[in-house]
């Protein structure tokens, strides 16, 4: 990606290096949280790494989250993340008003180890996530190493896709989709709940693609090979692949994010059209 020299977002909250004591005085995630993450992955048969933005890996807490300093960051990877965030701001500021709604920029919280959000306390093991309650994206940048080393998903656009996917969840939140889906999930059983989650996640993938299209067309951030990196990453984090890697079998009813094929296909739809209307995963019979 040609990201150097592009606008960097002001909406970065830097909580990196905050010690466990500073995330609410409960000693970080603690052994309970780690056990919880492992238990969740045991029951779902999914590698903890696969629990990307899955709320079940987040421990609820009554502590008030401590905010970090907001503004520009100096390190290379942090700056990259803030350029991607800034570009999603430009894209959605332009696109969302067409649906009759104003876009409100979310904040991206950078953290190391564990973090406290309005949705609860989470360790890095749960992967990047979006919390609808405080409208913040949470990202431990070391996740990018995990992605390339353990999952074979590397490249800057693969990383940008992860951020844009979480921004996609923010768009879903602003549009009231997140609220409607969680209401439906509360009324349904586990299998239907998972199926709704898959539609939600594939839509976030598609919305990430919509951003990629505009990053390319409007600001020329994209270089040859970038989209392929993103599609390879989407494929690498498909539920079938992760499940197979961790347990050696595949159980579609337990999926929450969609198969490699589905994730790739929905990201591609967004990348090719740049039109959020094509991202209606909820009225599509066949995903
Ligand atoms: Zn997601």
Image (cartoon, helix red, strand yellow):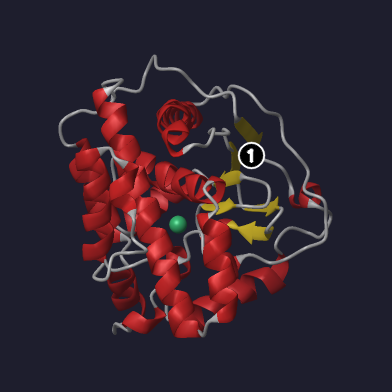
**Residue that carries the numbered disc 1 in the rendered image:** 16
Q: Position of residue 195 (x, y in %)?
A: 40, 75
Q: Is residue 261 visible?
A: yes
Q: Secondary structure at mark 1?
A: loop
Which quarter of the rendered image does ligand 1 occupy? bottom left
Q: Please, which residue is most extreme toward the top here?
A: 5
Q: Is residue 156 visible?
A: no
Q: Residue 118 vs residue 124: left or right?
A: right
* Image mark count: 1
Name the residue located 24 percent from the left edge and 41 percent from the top edge: 271
Q: Position of residue 161 (x, y in %)?
A: 35, 44
Q: Residue 180 vs residue 197: left or right?
A: right
> Which image quadrant is residue 1 in?
top left
Name the residue located 50 percent from the left edge and 83 percent from the top edge: 190
Name the residue located 45 percent from the left edge and 64 percent from the top edge: 49
Q: Please, which residue is most extreme toward the front here?
A: 100
Q: Position of residue 140 (x, y in %)?
A: 54, 47
Q: Position of residue 193 (x, y in %)?
A: 48, 77
Q: Residue 220 vs residue 124: left or right?
A: left
Please tell me whether residue 137 is drawn above or below residue 203 in the rendered image: above
Please tell me whether residue 259 is drawn above or below residue 212 in the rendered image: below
Q: Residues within 10 Å of mark 1 (few under 14, many from 20)?
A: some
Q: Please, which residue is most extreme toward the left here?
A: 224
Q: Nearer the viewer, residue 54 or 199?
A: 199
Please tell me whether residue 154 is drawn above or below residue 222 in the rendered image: below
> Which image quadrant is residue 69 in?
top right
């Amino acid at each position: 990606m040609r990201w150097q020299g592009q606008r960097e977002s002001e909406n970065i909250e830097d909580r990196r290096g905050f010690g466990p004591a500073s995330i609410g005085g409960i000693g970080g995630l603690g052994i309970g949280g780690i056990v919880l993450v492992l238990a969740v992955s045991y029951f779902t048969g999914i590698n903890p790494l696969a629990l990307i933005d899955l709320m079940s890996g987040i421990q609820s807490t009554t502590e008030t989250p401590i905010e970090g300093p907001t503004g520009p960051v100096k390190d290379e990877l942090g700056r990259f993340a803030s350029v991607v965030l800034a570009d999603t701001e430009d894209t959605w500021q332009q696109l969302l008003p067409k649906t009759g709604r104003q876009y409100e920029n979310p904040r991206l919280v950078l953290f190391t180890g564990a973090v406290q959000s309005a949705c609860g306390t989470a360790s890095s093991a749960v992967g990047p996530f979006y919390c609808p309650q405080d409208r913040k994206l949470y990202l431990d940048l070391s996740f990018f190493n995990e992605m390339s080393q353990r999952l074979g998903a590397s490249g800057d656009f693969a990383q940008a896709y992860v951020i844009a996917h979480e921004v996609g969840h923010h768009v879903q939140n602003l549009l009231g989709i997140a609220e409607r889906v969680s209401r439906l999930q509360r009324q349904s059983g586990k299998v239907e709940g998972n199926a709704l989650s898959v539609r939600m996640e594939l839509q976030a993938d598609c919305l990430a693609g919509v951003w990629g299209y505009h990053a390319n067309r409007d600001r020329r951030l994209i270089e040859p090979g970038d989209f392929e990196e993103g599609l390879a990453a989407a494929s690498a984090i498909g539920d079938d692949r992760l499940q197979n890697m961790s347990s050696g079998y595949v159980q579609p009813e337990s999926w929450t994010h969609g198969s490699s094929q589905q994730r790739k296909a929905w990201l591609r739809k967004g990348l090719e059209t740049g039109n959020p209307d094509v991202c209606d995963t909820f009225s599509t019979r066949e995903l």
